[in-house]
Each structure stands twice: as structure tokens, then as C-alpha cells.
Image (cartoon, rainbow, N blue to C red):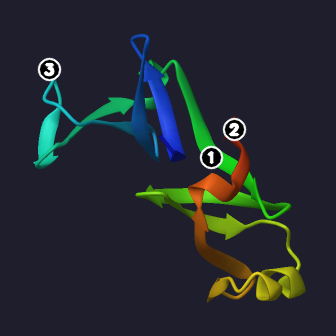
Amino acid sequence: MMRDGYVARWQGREYQASPDGDDVRLYQPEPGEGFDEVREGRYVRVLPASEIEDLAYVRTTCTWKGQPFIVLGEHDAWLRVEYTGGRWPVAEAMRLEVFEFGVYQGWAPAAEVTDLREQRV
């Protein structure tokens, strides 16, 4: 699983999360006590931040063709990646799409990606 977003630990379990001021929204794919359905397969519970055991941003990183990337998502045998090397000539040579000024993204064959790892930021 490729993750890029907040995670929180509450009562010894890790959840997808979203900080919201003094509160933290916890998300899970199944019903649970105190969780309200926001759409099919998505349930949320809002807790005071003081009740959260740990809150961190998790990001999946990798290397593709010798360059550093963040993994944003996956589909079949492909990974959606964002170049983090900061050199536009490299991004251009790799034929990455300009997502916005200074941000370059593309689809990498998963078989060509190395050093895949999750980091807590």
C-alpha cells in the first residue's frame, strides 16, 4: 500500500487522519462505534487532538531511473510519482508532466522503481 497523508494512532490502532484545529478526524473503511458514514466505505470519527496518541505525516518515496520521487498513487502495474530532485532539465529529459510551476509528475512502471519505502515526515 502506498501512503501519502496523515495517520493517527488512537487506542493502539492506526487510522488515516486529518488534523482540524484542536480536533483530529479519524477515517476507516468499515463501521465502528462512534464512526459516522460520510459515504459508502468511508467512516469518520472526530476526536480532540489531546486524545490522539500519535499524529504524523506519512509519505512513500522511491527512486526511478536514478532520480528521487514521492509516490502519490498506484494503478495496476504503474505508480504515479512526483519528482523531488528540483532540477527541471532532469524532469524535462524524463518527459514528466508539469503539474504546476516546479512540480513534475508522471507514471512509472512499478517494475522499474527501486528503494520503495515509507517515511514519517
Farthest residue, direction top:
12
| CB atoms of marks 2 and 1 within 8 Å | yes
Farthest residue, direction front:
111
In which quarter of the view is residue 57 placed? Answer: top right
Q: Secondary structure at mark 2?
A: strand
- Taking depth in this image into account, of 47 and 59 the one nearest to the observer is 59
Amino acid of disc 1: Arg
Cα distance, mark 2 to mark 3?
A: 30 Å
Q: Which residue is mark 3?
A: 33
Q: Could you tell whether 79 is left or right of 49 in the image?
A: right
Q: Which residue is mark 2?
A: 119
Q: Earlier in the sequence, mark 2 or mark 3?
A: 3
Q: Percent from the top left, x then y, of residue 118?
A: 65, 38
Q: Secondary structure at mark 3?
A: loop
Residue drawn at point x = 63 percent, y = 46 percent: 60
- State the mark number for residue 59: 1
- Taking depth in this image into account, of 110 and 120 the one nearest to the observer is 110
Cα distance, mark 2 to mark 1?
A: 5 Å
Q: Earlier in the sequence, mark 3 or mark 1?
A: 3
Amino acid of disc 2: Gln
- Taking depth in this image into account, of 42 and 108 the one nearest to the observer is 108
Is residue 9 something one can see in this rendering?
A: yes
In which quarter of the view is residue 41 placed? Answer: top left
Q: Percent from the top left, x then y, of residue 59?
A: 62, 46
